[in-house]
Image: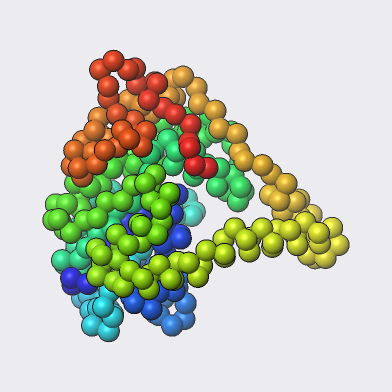
Amino acid sequence: MQNVFFHIGFPKTATTTLQRTMRDFDGCAYLGKGLRDSLQPSDSLEIARAVFFADTRRFEAMLPDLRTRLARHAAASPCVFVSDEAFAFAEHMVLGRKWQRQVVTDHETVAERLSRIAPGAGILFSVREQVSLLESFYRQHVKIDALSEPFGSYIQREIDALPHRSMLHHLRYDEVFSAYRQRFGDRILVSVYEAYAQDFGGYLDDVARFCGMDAAGLRASWQGRRLNENVVYGAFTGRLRRHVPDRLLATLSPARRQAIRRRLSRGPAEVAWSGAQRQAVAAHFERPNATFAWQAGLDLERFGYILPEPDVTPVTRIRSAAVP
């Protein structure tokens, strides 16, 4: 399936923007988050079920049907784009402790199953400097009331969960890259968030070339959506601020009213690292990042990634996120 592409996009790497752009682009069949009724949501859902929740026997039973579904889309469209942050972040994108205990978490198994579903597919792999990603992920989840604990205890919990069921473990880009290179060969496009955050249009051009899409059409799809996120959200929250006291909140429970007011009035969440936490995170990512830079041929030092340097202590390699 040469015209099928899996997007292995970590959270906070503009994944949602790319998904919405692909969803509205007529030049590809999009299977992923935010599907409209014009596509078949069940196809995307079945892929997720097979990759993340099925045991080996169930996966083998689902495999022929999944291949048939994808082949149908591949025959009808010049490109099939399948995207889900869970491909990269496993249980951290699945809500509910019950499901988190059951979900497939290792990159090797996810990559193996995707390669079985669509042999010969292409891989779009998006990464972001880990400290910046962790801080942004925390701020977002505080904003939506998914997290309430201080950043220090949040990050300490992830450090204590090493080496396996931890966000830090899943951010080992060298292991992710190796898992997909082994199964998909050279059909991998690695994109660095810090580079394309400054030129998203150029990033879309790279994606279009890699996937064989119409670059101008893909850019037009993105530009048509640019007003949606900040302008529309700002206007919506402005209306909420004006009408919260007597209109929109009148029918809600007191707890829900308080949560909405708190969210609207909340500023950016405070992020503060302890020295020991800086040391632990630096030690965890230094050598894996160096390996990943060599594997993918990337200059990660240019973007402030944690890398080993003989004359610089690991602690000094941690910096605060440049992009919230």
The colouring scheme, among rainbow, by chain, secondary structure or one colour, is rainbow
Relative placement, left or right, of 101 versus 290 is: right
Determine the residue positioned at 40% across, 59% down: 201
Which one is in front, 308 or 197? 197
Relative placement, left or right, of 40 versus 108 is: right
Furthest toward the top, the residue is: 311
Which one is in front, 138 or 65? 138
Residue 285 rendering spot, x and y as whole percentages: 31, 32
Furthest toward the right, the residue is: 246
Determine the residue positioned at 31% across, 51% down: 191
Rendered-image quadrant of the N terminus: bottom left
Residue 132 rendering spot, x and y as whole percentages: 44, 38
| Count of labels in the image | 0
Q: Quadrant of residue 134?
A: top left
Residue 156 rendering spot, x and y as whole percentages: 47, 30
Relative placement, left or right, of 278 versus 8 is: right
Q: Is residue 89 visible?
A: no
Which one is in front, 274 or 154? 274
Question: Vertical placement of 182 versus 154: above or below?
Answer: below
Determine the residue positioned at 55% across, 47% down: 140
Question: Vertical placement of 311 versus 287: above or below?
Answer: above
Residue 307 rendering spot, x and y as whole percentages: 29, 29
Question: Vertical placement of 276 versus 14: above or below?
Answer: above
Q: Quadrant of residue 99?
A: bottom left
Which one is in front, 107 or 222? 222
Q: Is residue 131 visible?
A: yes
Question: Vertical placement of 226 versus 35: above or below?
Answer: above
Determine the residue positioned at 36% across, 57% down: 202
